[in-house]
Image (cartoon, helix red, strand yellow):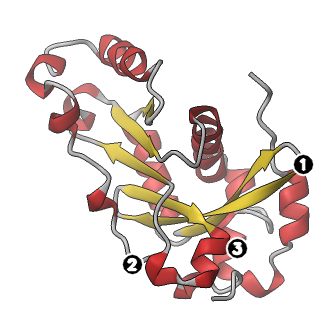
Amino acid sequence: DDESSPQQLVMSTSAAHVARRLGEIVKLPLLERETTSTIAEIWTDYHATRRDAVGRHLSAAHAQLLMDRATPAPTFLFPVHREGGHFLLLSQFQKKHFLFTYLEDYKKNPALAQPNLTVTLHDDLAAKKDIVLVRADVDSMLSSTEADHTLTQLFETYLIHSRYASPIGALGFNQSPQTFDHEAYVRAYPRRQPS
C-alpha cells in the first residue's frame, strides 16, 4: 500500500464496469457519415452540459502516443485542488482506459478502491476519420470541472514529452518511485482556473 511502488498497483476494478462501448453512447453508423470536424463538434456538444461525463477528442496519432507512453508508465498521481488544500487521485492505465481512484482509498484497501473517474479512448473512428473520441465518466465525488481539468492534465502529462520524461513526470514516477519528489510535483502541478 505504499504510494511509491507503482509497479505493484493493481486495482481490483476493471474499466469494463463503467466504460461503455461507443455504439452504446452514440449512433455510430450516423456518426461515421460525418466529417471529422463535425464528429468532434457533435461529441463536444453532446458532453457540454453533462454532469456525469466529459467529452474530448484526439487525433489518432495523439491517442496512440498517449497509449504508447502510458504502457511503460501506467500509474501516476493527479492532485485535485479544492479550497483549503488538495487530494490525490491515483491513475492506472489498462489498455484503452485510465482509471482514477482516491489515493487514500487505494492505500486503505486496493481491492475496495473504486474508480471516481474512468477515461476511455474510443478508437472506432481512428482508421477512417483520424479521430479518437475520449470520454471521462465522472462519479458524484468529483465535479465535471475537476474531471475536465484532470483530463487536460492527463493529456499534457503523457503527450508533452518534457512533462512525461521529467523526474517528476509519469515516467520518473514509474521508473524511479523511490526518488520521486511528491512535494515538488504537487507544487509544480497546474491548478485549474476558477470557473
Cα separation between marks 2 and 3: 21 Å
Instruction: Return the residue nearer the eye: 164 or 146.
Output: 146
Residue tagged 1: 84
Left or right placement of residue 20 versus residue 69 in this view? left
The percent coordinates of residue 113 (x first, y second) are 50, 73
Q: Residue 57 sits in which quadrant?
A: top left
Tell which of 105 and 148 is nearer to you. 105
Q: Alpha carbon of mark 1 to alpha carbon of mark 2: how far?
A: 31 Å
For disc 3, the marked residue is 173
User: Can you tell which of label 2 and label 3 is closer to the viewer?
Assistant: 2
- Mark 2 neighbour class, 10 Å CA radius: few under 14, some 14 to 19, many 20 or more: few
Q: Quadrant of residue 55?
A: top left
Q: What's the distance in space between the residues labelled 3 and 1, CA to CA?
A: 26 Å
Amino acid tagged 1: Gly
Which-is-in-front pick, marks 1 and 2?
Answer: 1
Residue pointed to by mark 2: 12
Q: Position of residue 99 (x, y in %)?
A: 46, 60
Drawn side of residue 163 relative to residue 20, left or right: right
Question: Mark 3: which secondary structure?
Answer: helix
Mark 1 or 2, nearer chain start: 2
From the top left corner, tell me how far across and down residue 119 is, in percent. Answer: 43, 49
Q: Relative to 125, is 11 above or below?
A: below
Residue 149 position, x and y percent, is 65, 38
Pointer 2 with pointer 3, Cβ within 8 A = no
Q: Are marks 3 and 1 in contact (CB under 8 Å)?
A: no
Crowding around mark 3 (Cα neighbors within 10 Å: few <14, some 14 to 19, many 20+) is many
